[in-house]
Image (cartoon, grey):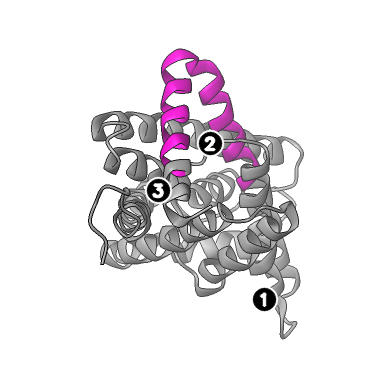
Amino acid sequence: MIDRDYVEKAAESGVRKLSLLHHDPGRYLTRSVLAGMQLSIVLFVFWSLSYNLHDVSVGKVIASAFFGVGLTIIVFTNAELFTSNNMYLAVSSAEGRTSWSQSVLLWVACYLGNFAGALVVAGLLYGAGVLDALPADHALYTGAEHKVHQAGSVIFFKGILANWIVCLAVRVALRCKEDIAKIAVLVLIVFIFLYLGFEHSIANMGTFSMSILGHGSISVADAIHNLIYSTLGNIVGGVVFVGLPFAYINPSEHLPRR
């Protein structure tokens, strides 16, 4: 396949996602809820690894590398993640296969489904007594506190960086023919944004939900502050930094090439 074929593949994915939302919204929302659940349980492992390996020199590397498992599960189970859909629907809209208003509708539906999934996992961990057993200085709680106490502009730009990286991982994975190569790409590229501490709105949903239900010190208002700016940044990162350039640099055959 040439690069143009991958643009068509991404655009077709955007069309299929929108069609599923319109014709079978229950199934689409279920896929979105599952993505939120899958990412949140992996996120909890990430925070646990960060805490347990705090004194190990490569502890942060190990914890950050593990987080890519979450996106891998989502990709391989056909679940629907808001941040990667920013790219897919940007490509399909740039190609004229969907409209921007339809894209926004799908993003809202996916976002709400992801949020519901994050709440489900946080509730399950709370019910199992796992959150209650965490010490007050656990990485989950200190990490959540750090995230919400940043300036809105900082969160916004970190949000751009986070989804630029996540959508690059999905973009590169489109070229992989073998599953093992796709897994390696997803894990290694996603590692970048975790290791550098950027802001992913859906991951933050899980972090904040677990922190609020546990012994964390953040409030709902604190969480909303972060989610507003990280979500806007994620949209810019996925649309402006990956989706639109992806379509633009690989034009249709009838367009002049240089």
Q: Outermost residue toward the top?
A: 23
**Mark 2 residue crowding within 10 angstroms, few (<14) / some (14–19) / many (20+):** many
Q: Which residues are magenta?
A: 10-39
Residue 115 is tagged as none
> Mark 1 and mark 3: span between their CA atoms?
27 Å
Residue 80 is tagged as 2
The image quadrant of residue 155 is: bottom left
> Mark 2 and mark 3: span between their CA atoms?
12 Å
Amino acid found under the numbered disc labelled 1: Val
Check disc 3 and report the residue beneath it: 87
Amino acid found under the numbered disc labelled 2: Glu
Is 37 covered by the magenta stretch? yes
Q: Which residue is at the front of the view, 48 or 28?
A: 28
**Image vertical order of residue 210 relative to residue 186, above or below:** above
Nearer to us of marks 2 and 3 is 3
Q: Residue at x 41, y 17 (%)?
A: 22
Q: Tell me which label, 2 or 3, sits earlier in the chain.
A: 2
Nearer to us of marks 1 and 2 is 2
Can residue 136 be seen here? The reply is no
Callouts 1 and 2 close, C-beta under 8 Å: no
Check disc 1 and report the residue beneath it: 61
Nearer to us of marks 1 and 3 is 3
Q: Residue at x 29, y 38 (%)?
A: 93
Q: Which residue is at the front of the view, 107 or 103?
A: 103
Callouts 1 and 3 close, C-beta under 8 Å: no
**In terms of secondary structure, what is the magenta stretch mainly?**
helix
